[in-house]
């Protein structure tokens, strides 16, 4: 099922909202093939919502959102907004992990979660100084690791870090 929820077209803007939905019965051939290949590919309900809004084409101001669920589990959620501060936010859910990325002109963050526990968080903050004939980009980078995470354990073995102290 593909359903066009809304479509508005102006002289300098437009809005398109679409929802797609696919239902699979457990007795169908496709469901059996997916379950044979991998149980993680199986689904009974797949839904994707798309929101594309061009607010001002001349100024390149837009708002985009894509949301995908599989059997009521949010798999993918992306938001791009250039109306005020350009921002990209992405959320990907896996079986027990969640990956979140946020990107703005001055900061990039990536975070890996196990449930609600942060296993790793990477933060990169940037500042720019524009001169008459030069641009200076300065930044700081932080990496936060949970001591109980597999990433911390793997890095401590590779880098020969004593974790008992």
Image (cartoon, rainbow, N blue to C red):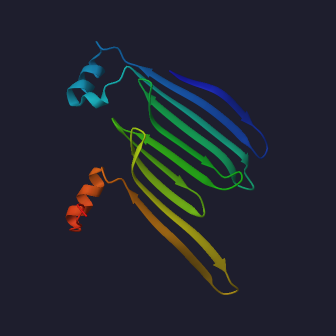
In the image, taking residue 61 as reference, residue 90 lies left or right, namely left
Say if 101 sits above or below 157 in the image: above
Residue displayed at 24% across by 24% down:
35
* Numbered-mark total: 0
Q: Quadrant of residue 32?
A: top left
Residue 110 in percent (x, y) is at 45, 54
Q: Nearer the viewer, residue 85 or 126?
A: 126
Residue displayed at 56% across by 51% down:
88
Residue 33 in percent (x, y) is at 24, 24
Residue displayed at 71% across by 53% down:
84
Say if 39 sits above or below 64 in the image: above
In the image, taking residue 138 as reference, residue 53 lies left or right, namely right
Q: Nearer the viewer, residue 101 or 118?
A: 118
In the image, taking residue 34 as reference, residue 47 lies left or right, namely right
Residue 57 in percent (x, y) is at 72, 51
Q: Nearer the viewer, residue 147 or 112?
A: 147
Residue displayed at 29% across by 57% down:
152
Say if 122 sits above or below 53 in the image: below
Q: Quadrant of residue 22?
A: top left
Q: Residue lying at the far bottom in this picture: please name it.
A: 133
């Amino acid at each position: 099922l593909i359903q066009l929820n809304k479509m508005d077209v102006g002289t300098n803007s437009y809005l398109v909202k679409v929802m797609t939905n696919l239902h699979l019965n457990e007795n169908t051939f496709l469901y059996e093939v997916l379950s044979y290949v991998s149980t993680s590919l199986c689904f009974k309900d797949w839904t994707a919502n798309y929101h594309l809004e061009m607010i001002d084409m001349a100024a390149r101001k837009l708002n985009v959102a894509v949301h995908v669920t599989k059997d009521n589990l949010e798999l993918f959620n992306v938001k791009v907004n250039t109306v005020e501060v350009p921002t990209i936010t992405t959320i990907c859910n896996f079986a027990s992990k969640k990956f979140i990325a946020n990107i703005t002109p001055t900061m990039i963050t990536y975070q890996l979660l196990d449930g609600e526990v942060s296993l790793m968080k990477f933060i990169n903050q940037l500042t720019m100084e524009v001169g008459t004939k030069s641009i200076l980009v300065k930044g700081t980078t932080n990496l936060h690791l949970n001591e109980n995470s597999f990433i911390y354990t793997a890095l401590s073995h590779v880098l020969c870090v004593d974790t008992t102290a």
